[in-house]
Image (cartoon, rainbow, N blue to C red):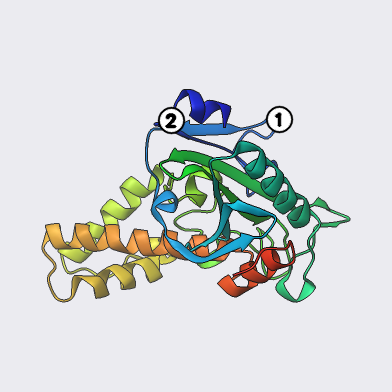
């Protein structure tokens, strides 16, 4: 909040300090910011909760693919207290039916990514709930990009991706370029590109019979966007927004 007081046209956030859900460098607090309004910042509230003890604060369950709680107030101390209460509850939260385990023999698994912008409503602090737990079915992470999407993005889904701006592997420029050429030329997918079978099928369907270069390129972008949205859904610790509401109600907030 000090930062956005000095630079109110920027956002700033901090990566979760754990592998798979944090940044590429975890040896220090990993802050990132910038002048862009990211998609998560623009996402509207699915639910708004209030607290009788904190009438100056609104707590939103954000209508976003990931699990995000947004705390809004012009009073800094209230935001600090509420964010810390949410963080403390989440890092100790357990729901084995949902696959959420805060700590086991492999270490700590629950963490948050906080990110703040300053608007006419005051400070808008978003707390992204994250878990890096693994399982036999998902050895790369239960709440990470699932295997069918690894051809597009297998690397960590950090703070910037979690807010809707994906940093994709540079290899995709060449690989998706080849896929585009195949569709434009009416060719089948090559055996060496079999990992892209689902992407090829998705792009082909989006072309809707028009295989001009311009339309194929549009279809590739749309397919990529859809895959990135699905990856964010994979990262959501609560798949149902009412589960997030229940989490907040346990802290004393009410719809």
Of 54 and 124, nearer the camera is: 54
Residue 167 rendering spot, x and y as whole percentages: 44, 44
* Image vertical order of residue 112 relative to residue 219, above or below: above
The tag on residue 185 is none
* Quarter of the figure with residue 68: bottom right
- Image position, residue 241 (x, y; %): 56, 71
Front residue of this view, candidates 195 and 95: 95
Instruction: Residue at 79%, 72% (x, y): give it.
Output: 96
Q: Is residue 197 found left or right of 11 in the rendered image? A: left
Question: In this rendering, would 219 be left or right of 201?
Answer: left
Q: Where is residue 60 drawn, in percent x and y? A: 54, 59
Find residue 141 and report its image quarter: bottom right
Count residues near mark 2 (Cα–Cα under 10 Å), then give few for <14, some for 14-19, many for 20+: some
Residue 209, located in which quarter of the rendered image? bottom left
Q: Secondary structure at mark 2?
A: loop
Residue at the right extreme, as displayed: 105
Q: Is residue 88 left or right of residue 239?
A: right
- Residue placed under numbered mark 1 in the picture: 27
Q: Secondary structure at mark 1?
A: loop
**Count of all numbered marks drawn on residues in the image:** 2
Q: Which mark is residue 8?
A: 2
Q: Where does residue 45 sit, x and y in percent of width and height?
A: 47, 62
Query: Does the image show residue 240?
Result: no
Q: Which is nearer the N-term, disc 2 or disc 1?
A: 2
Crowd band around label 1 with a 10 angstrom C-alpha radius: few (<14), some (14–19), many (20+) = few
In this view, 144 is above or below 163: below
Name the quarter where the N terminus is drawn. Answer: top right
Q: Residue at x 75, y 76 (%)?
A: 97
Q: Residue at x 26, y 75 (%)?
A: 205
């Amino acid at each position: 909040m000090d930062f956005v007081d000095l630079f109110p046209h920027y956002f700033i956030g901090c990566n979760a300090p754990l592998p798979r859900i944090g940044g590429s460098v975890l040896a220090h607090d990993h802050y990132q910011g910038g002048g862009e309004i990211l998609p998560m910042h623009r996402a509207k509230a699915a639910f708004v909760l209030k607290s009788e003890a904190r009438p100056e604060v609104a707590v939103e369950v954000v209508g976003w693919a990931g699990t995000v709680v947004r705390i809004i107030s012009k009073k800094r101390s209230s935001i600090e207290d509420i964010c810390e209460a949410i963080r403390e509850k989440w890092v100790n939260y357990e729901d084995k039916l949902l696959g959420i385990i805060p700590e086991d023999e492999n270490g700590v698994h629950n963490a948050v990514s906080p990110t703040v912008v300053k608007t006419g409503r005051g400070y808008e602090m978003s707390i992204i709930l994250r878990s890096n737990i693994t399982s036999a079915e998902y050895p790369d992470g239960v709440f990470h990009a699932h295997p069918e999407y690894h051809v597009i993005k297998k690397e960590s889904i950090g703070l910037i991706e979690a807010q809707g701006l994906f940093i994709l592997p540079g290899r995709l420029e060449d690989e998706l370029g080849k896929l585009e050429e195949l569709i434009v030329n009416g060719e089948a997918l090559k055996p060496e590109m079999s990992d892209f079978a689902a992407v090829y099928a998705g792009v082909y369907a989006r072309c809707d019979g028009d295989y001009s270069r311009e339309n194929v390129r549009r279809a590739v972008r749309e397919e990529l966007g859809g895959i990135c949205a699905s990856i964010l859904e994979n990262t959501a610790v609560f798949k149902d927004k009412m589960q997030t509401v229940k989490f907040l109600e346990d802290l004393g907030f009410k719809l």
